[in-house]
Amino acid sequence: QVQLVESGGGLVQAGGSLRLSCAASGRIFDINTMGWYRQAPGKQRELVALMFSSGGTIYADSAKGRFTISRDNAKNMVYLQMNSLKPEDTAVYYCLYYSDNQYWGRGTQVTVSS
């Protein structure tokens, strides 16, 4: 089992920045994928960014150029630096860990006001 705890969400004005953090604990494998998805009201959960333990990354088109994912493998942490936030970025952001199985955090709310 893996437990994920997100932090760093909040209310920010359009154009502002937030940094999300996710701490993983439990049975962590060296080779894994960690990242972020988000779900806005009335919409499906969608990919934001993923980072492999090798360092490779995948970004959604909506995140490219504005968001940066990073990891600290020694601490089993993953981060999402979000800049130039837009009202359409408002959503609950979920941390994902994938290795032997897929695990989700409980989510952290990000609200961007116009």
Image (cartoon, rainbow, N blue to C red):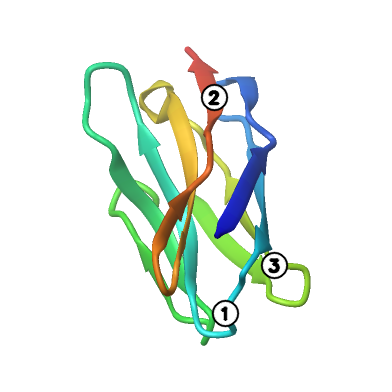
Q: What residue is shown with label 1?
A: 29
Which residue is pictured at 43% across the width and 24% down the height? 90
Q: Is residue 55 left or right of residue 77?
A: left
Kind of residue indicated by mark 2: Gln
Residue 44 rendering spot, x and y as whole percentages: 22, 32
Number of other residues with Cα within 10 Å of mark 1, as a class: few under 14, some 14 to 19, many 20 or more: few
- The answer to whether residue 53 is left or right of residue 62 is right
Instruction: Compute the Cα span from label 3 to label 2.
Output: 22 Å
Residue at point 61% right, 66% down?
A: 70
Viewer-proximal residue among 65 and 112: 112
First reached walking from the N terminus: tag 3 or tag 2: 3
Residue mark closest to the camera, 1 vs 2: 1
Which residue is under mark 3? Answer: 76
The kind of secondary structure element at disc 2 is strand
Residue 103 vertical position relative to residue 13 in the rendered view, above or below: below
Q: What's the residue at 60%, 49% (across, down)? A: 4
* 48 vs 16, nearest the viewer: 48
Tell me the tag on residue 109. 2
Mark nearer the N terminus (1 vs 2): 1
Q: Which amino acid does the dot numbered 3 rest on?
A: Asn
